[in-house]
Amino acid sequence: MSEVRLHIHLVTGFPKLVQSPLQDSIIRRAQTKGLVKIDVYDLRQYTFDKHHQIDDYPYGGGPGMVLKPEPIFRCVQDIKKRFRLEKPRVVLLTPDGETYNQRKAEELSAERHVILISGHYKGVDERVREALVTDEISIGDYVLSGGELPALVVIDSIVRLVPGVLSDYDSAATDSFSTGLLDHPHYTRPEEYEGMRVPDVLLSGHHAEIARWRREKALERTKQRRPDLYEEFMKRKALEKEN
Ligand code: ADE
């Protein structure tokens, strides 16, 4: 077994919603290899009332329910105490958070412990944000019914960046965004499918030419689909040249 590089603590009112995706594919392999540990905490276990209530009506009225502060505080404090964490990253998944990107994924994957809190219903009591949360993340400008799926998105994206999780063959280093560009097109067998041929250069065996073709395609695709990324990339390259 390897040393645990990243320990993820996922705090949720809906543990069943997240369990299965955490037990499959690369996320499962990362845990089996002992590189990543993922614990799911059921907020209802941190309630003391008879009905295990995790949410309540909003003060001031209005639609929707708000997640209560006490179970979240108790759960996070319990995690901190148990693992002797002084100032861990505590991430709240919320549509009004900072928009998630690969840079943030890289930053989080370098931590030893990450606590993720899935918001649900209408929101989370503001005192949780004020006193517990260090980062607020949105996975995009659309509203989901809760932070569980966004938490899984964050987990998937950070687990695959932990060294040793991906084989060299699947390496994340050439992924879209990691290089600052979108990825180049990919082909596999057969060479011809319904009249559509794989580009000759990829069958040529000329590694330098293949690398050049991939680079060109990545640039072309980024310029066309994400002019914002393309511009940023070109600026960075120009700066690198100067220095
Ligand atoms: N909760 C609901 N919608 C969300 C989003 N887009 N990102 C993060 N958390 C959310």
Image: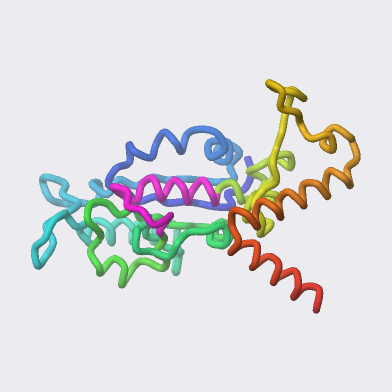
Could you say which quadrant of the image residue 105 lies in?
Answer: bottom right
Residue range corresponding to the magenta coloring: 138-158
Where does the image place residue 59, in percent across and percent down from the top left? 11, 66
Please count the marks in the image.
Answer: 0
Where does the image place residue 119, in percent across and percent down from the top left? 30, 54
Q: Which residue shows up at 30% across the image and 49% down it? A: 146
Foreground pick, 180 / 47: 180
Where does the image place residue 43, in percent across and percent down from the top left? 27, 49
Could you say which quadrant of the image residue 29 lies in?
Answer: top right
Whether the magenta-drawn stretch holds residue 109 is answered as: no
Q: How is the image coloured?
A: rainbow
Considering the image in quadrants, where does the N terminus appear? top right
Q: Which residue shows up at 75% across the image and 23% down it? A: 192
Q: Look at the picture and state if 148 lies above or below 91.
A: above
- Residue 82 visible to an observer of this rendering: no
Q: Is residue 99 toward the left or the right of residue 67 in the image? A: right
Q: Which residue shows up at 59% across the image and 52% down it? A: 5
Give the farthest residue toward the bottom: 243
Could you say which quadrant of the image residue 177 lies in?
Answer: bottom right
Whether the magenta-drawn stretch holds residue 155 is answered as: yes
Q: Is residue 222 toward the left or the right of residue 243 in the image? A: left
Foreground pick, 208 / 127: 208
Give the farthest residue toward the left: 61
- Residue 115 visible to an observer of this rendering: yes
Q: Which residue shows up at 55% across the image and 48% down it? A: 159
Considering the image in quadrants, where does the C terminus appear? bottom right
Foreground pick, 140 / 1: 140
